[in-house]
Image (spheres, helix red, strand yellow):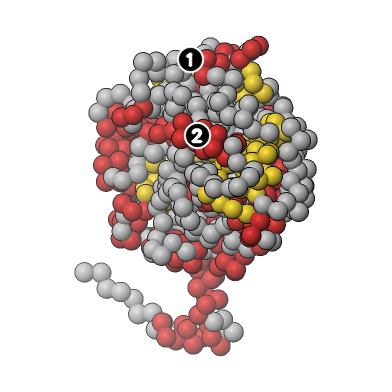
């Protein structure tokens, strides 16, 4: 047995150091700073290289693993050394408050920091129109509404305020913006796109990204910035319709389908938003469920590695979509190998970290995936974590909690609502007068905050009713008039009046949906809503129809009945913004960022020509 040499007792060392003016905390800091990756004064690439050199294969694979929060317990973090956790749509703590979110994300983070190397987690969520999973936050108009504004400054401010509300709750990673360029409005994700026009999508997406990642010029990594994620690479807005099918059984008709175009068209229509996002500093990009040339994008090495990482010079990391690698060919082992070799860096499992880790470890041992590919993926992930400042500020920024859902944030949302409204028709009906003795308001959607917000609001598919805090269009009208007696509301328009009221308002539109469950073969207004419009038409001298929808819909039956028609899209929680424009406090300024067809015969966009157009791209009355 090797005998230890006698040394200076530890207590004596501490006494000597203390006499030298060094506290235990400062001693600990000096030891920490001697480890290169823990020293904030060292360059990021050196920190990444040092940390990577200390990692085992299991720790590297852990960094490439992204799981959903409901599928893990706290000890799962340390067991699998996870790189990221996410909340899917509806993945909230109870109670669903900003404070509870901060407690939840901090608990996950503390567990990550207890691991051998103490690598902090990325915590992700789909904050696609505000921090929309959290009750009490501000829900902004969906991207389709922002497209109508053509206002890049506004988009940047919305990105900034969304980042602030996220960072207050400890969510550091946003799966947004969606930079799809929808070419078929039957797609259930149309409202996630700013426009059918590539240039407009590129401009607004870049502005939103700047807002997320740049704190008033302080740059990416400032305390209230988050990691933005342009998505879904590439071509998800151009998938072909699955003819002869119905989505009644949940079969997606456009979502996750095949983009059938040549490479020149793919590059012209869908690549520019990504090229610009990379120039603007995108550090993460999410890959699409969809296919191009019959190959799933998660297997497409040419587009992911050669084009995106090579040609465009993207140095961040690629993340998969929800269980998307499960759609690739072969068994699970083959799916893991194919996706990593194609260029995926982090995989959204989202439930079974054990199977993914085991498969990837075996693939490396069998040399089906090279250790160089693993190191490249982990280097990209670690680089972004250092850039974001997670090693120095891993926890929720609770100083920001008091301004979550604040009046200032809601004022910005009302501005966005006002600027997004598009006046489609006006026969001397708008603006409305505050001096009207009586206004009739009808339509269940007039007083439905959930329908006003649409999908991706608290729950994945959204919902109806008072799901969070905000003002409905009806309450907005009442607040503008400040005379409840002047407003009579009947959801189904069954008014009993001796004579006609001067003005009637009917709110119609779509019920909430998200993703492929919103794929629709027929975008006609439901018959019961058409009947409400007819009923109120008989009870008023002037009829105004407000449409809540995630895309242009077919309005041929109500067009001749209405004196004025307003497209309000999915305005979010601040319905008062609609009323402010209706009563002339502000002018209509929105312009269509999508072509509005006359009938379903003119859908998709390629068929919307000549007589098929009801309102052209760029249309909007003042």
Q: Secondary structure at mark 1?
A: loop
Residue drawn where x is 57% and y is 57% of the image: 470
Q: Position of residue 464 (x, y in %)?
A: 45, 49
Determine crowd level at label 1: few under 14, some 14-19, many 20+ residues with C-alpha closer than 10 A. some
Residue 138 in percent (x, y) is at 58, 55
In this figure, which residue is indicated by the disc labeled 1? 260
The residue to which callout 2 is attached is: 531
Q: Is residue 453 above or below residue 554?
A: below
- Image quadrant of residue 430? top right
- Residue 320 at least partly seen: no
Residue at image coords 63%, 54%? 487
Q: Horizontal and vertical percent for residue 149? A: 70, 38
Q: Which mark is residue 392?
A: none
| Label 2 environment density (alpha carbons within 10 Å; few <14, some 14–19, many ≥20) | some
Report the side of 277 relative to 59 (left or right).
Answer: right
Furthest residue toward front: 498
Which residue is at 42% across, 37% downward? 321
Q: CA distance from mark 1 to mark 2?
A: 40 Å
């Amino acid at each position: 047995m090797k005998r230890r040499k006698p040394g200076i007792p530890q207590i004596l060392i501490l006494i000597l150091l203390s006499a030298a003016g060094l506290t235990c905390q400062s001693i600990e800091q000096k030891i920490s700073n001697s480890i290169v990756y823990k020293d904030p004064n060292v360059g990021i690439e050196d920190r990444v290289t040092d940390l990577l050199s200390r990692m085992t294969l299991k720790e590297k694979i852990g960094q490439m693993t992204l799981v959903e929060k409901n599928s893990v317990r706290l000890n799962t973090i340390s067991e699998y050394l996870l790189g990221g956790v996410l909340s899917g749509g509806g993945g909230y703590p109870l109670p669903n408050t900003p404070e509870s979110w901060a407690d939840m994300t901090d608990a996950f983070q503390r567990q990550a920091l207890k691991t051998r190397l103490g690598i902090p987690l990325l915590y992700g969520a789909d904050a696609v129109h505000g921090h929309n999973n959290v009750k009490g936050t501000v829900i902004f108009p969906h991207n389709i509404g922002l497209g109508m504004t053509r206002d890049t400054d506004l988009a940047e401010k919305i990105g900034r305020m969304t980042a602030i509300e996220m960072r207050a709750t400890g969510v550091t990673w946003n799966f947004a913006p969606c930079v799809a360029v929808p070419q078929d409005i039957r797609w259930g994700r149309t409202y996630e796109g700013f426009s059918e026009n590539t240039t407009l999508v590129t401009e607004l997406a870049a502005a939103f990204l700047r807002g997320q990642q740049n704190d008033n010029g302080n740059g990416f990594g400032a305390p209230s910035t988050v990691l933005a994620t342009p998505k879904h690479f590439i071509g998800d807005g151009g998938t072909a319709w699955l003819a002869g099918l119905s989505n009644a059984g949940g079969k997606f008709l456009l979502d996750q389908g095949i983009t059938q175009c040549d490479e020149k068209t793919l590059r012209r229509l869908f690549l520019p938003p990504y090229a610009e996002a990379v120039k603007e500093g995108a550090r993460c990009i999410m890959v699409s469920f969809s296919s191009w040339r019959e190959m799933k994008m998660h297997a497409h090495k040419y587009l992911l590695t050669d084009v995106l990482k090579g040609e465009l010079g993207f140095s961040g990391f690629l993340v998969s979509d929800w269980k998307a690698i499960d759609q690739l060919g072969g068994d699970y082992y083959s799916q893991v190998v194919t996706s990593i070799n194609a260029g995926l860096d982090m995989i959204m499992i989202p439930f079974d970290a054990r199977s993914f880790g085991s498969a990837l470890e075996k693939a490396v041992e069998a040399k089906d995936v090279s250790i160089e590919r693993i190191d490249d993926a982990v280097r990209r992930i670690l680089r972004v974590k250092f850039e974001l400042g997670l090693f120095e500020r891993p926890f929720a920024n609770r100083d920001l909690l008091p301004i979550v859902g604040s009046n200032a944030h809601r004022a910005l949302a009302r501005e966005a609502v006002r600027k997004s409204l598009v006046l489609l028709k006006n026969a001397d009906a708008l603006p409305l007068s505050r001096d009207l003795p009586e206004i009739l308001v009808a339509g269940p959607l007039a007083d439905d905050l959930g329908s006003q917000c649409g999908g991706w609001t608290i729950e994945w598919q959204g919902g109806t009713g008072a799901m969070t805090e905000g003002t409905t269009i009806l309450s907005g009208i009442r607040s503008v008039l400040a005379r409840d007696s002047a407003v009579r509301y009947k959801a189904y328009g069954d008014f009993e009046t001796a004579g006609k009221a001067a003005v009637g308002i009917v709110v119609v539109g779509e019920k909430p949906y998200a993703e492929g469950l919103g794929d629709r073969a027929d975008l006609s207004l439901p018959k019961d809503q058409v009947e409400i419009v007819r009923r109120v038409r008989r009870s008023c001298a002037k009829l105004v129809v407000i449409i809540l929808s995630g895309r242009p819909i077919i309005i041929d039956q109500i067009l001749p009945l209405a004196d004025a028609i307003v497209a309000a899209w999915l305005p979010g929680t601040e319905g008062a913004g609609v009323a402010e424009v209706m009563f002339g406090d502000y002018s209509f300024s929105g312009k269509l960022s999508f072509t509005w067809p006359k009938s379903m015969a003119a859908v998709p966009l390629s068929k919307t020509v000549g007589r098929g157009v009801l309102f052209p791209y760029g249309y909007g009355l003042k």
